[in-house]
Image (spheres, rainbow, N blue to C red):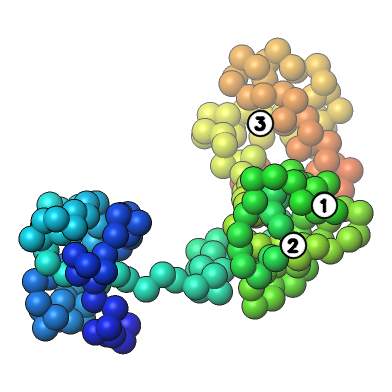
Amino acid sequence: MEFDKSKILTCVTGSKDLIGKMGWFADSPIRIADNVISMKPTELILFDENDGYPFKNKQGYPSVLFYPAQEPTHEELFEEWIRENDVKEGTHVKVVKHFGADVNSGIVYGTDDGKKKYIYGSVGTIDKLCRYCADVKFSDGKVWDCPHTALEVVKEEKQEDIADTLNEAQKEYLKKCVEKENVIFIENITESLKENGINPITIFSVIFDAVLKGKEFDKLRGGNNGK
């Protein structure tokens, strides 16, 4: 960040509107310039123009001068959102806030805005990442440009391998249930499966799906392919 001496604030140029802003505190221009280079900005919590030390930070340090940190641009915040959420084309997002026509500003409005009203609450996929906003494609095939401030990334749930949810005793018991000659009788062992702590509905689904697709239960059967 390039230091600009003209942006140093005093009891005359400061105001209570600055409260909550991040910046640097010191009693001389030289010291505040050093702080900008060597320290992280802290929050301004108090301003009193009638005090000899009008500025006070969150740590309770009073100072004569305050140098506000530069606010990140909308473009920088958009890039940060993409990076932190690993957003790319095909990422699922949900519209969680109403927004206005000027999507490049990132401003989210509290009221509905015309033709975009109907997409509130909808889930779509990122069609294209532009410089200031994201083009989102919805189920009706339409693509709308949306500010990231109105979007929430829908996290994909990782499907757990059924074999990894069973303990060794359950795996051993299940091996007997899925031997080729016993598959036809599996509907008759519901209660037995329950007694052994295995959800029969889940197991039936996996077994019948595998049988229909010609899959073998290598992981559950020790890799012997039922031989």
Q: Quick one: label 3 or label 1, which is nearer the N terminus?
A: 1
| Mark 1: amino acid | Gly
Q: Residues within 10 Å of mark 3 (few under 14, many from 20)?
A: some
Q: Decide: marks 1, 2 in contact (CB < 8 A)? A: yes
Residue marked by disc 2: 101
Badge 1 marks a residue whose secondary structure is helix
- Label 3, on which residue? 174
At x 65%, y 51%, the residue is: 109
Evaluate if marks 3 and 1 touch, with contact meaning CB atoms under 8 Å apart: no
As measured in the structure, the alpha-carbon distance from the residue carrying label 3 to the one carrying label 1 is 58 Å
Q: CA distance from mark 1 to mark 2?
A: 9 Å
Q: Residue at x 29, y 78 (%)?
A: 7
Counting residues from the N terminus, which is met first, the one under dot 1 or under dot 2? 2
Whether residue 18 is visible here, answered yes or no, is yes
Q: Tell me where residue 226 appears, x and y as whole percent.
A: 74, 44
Q: Residues within 10 Å of mark 2 (few under 14, many from 20)?
A: some
The residues tagged by marks 2 and 3 sit, at their Cα atoms, a distance apart of 58 Å
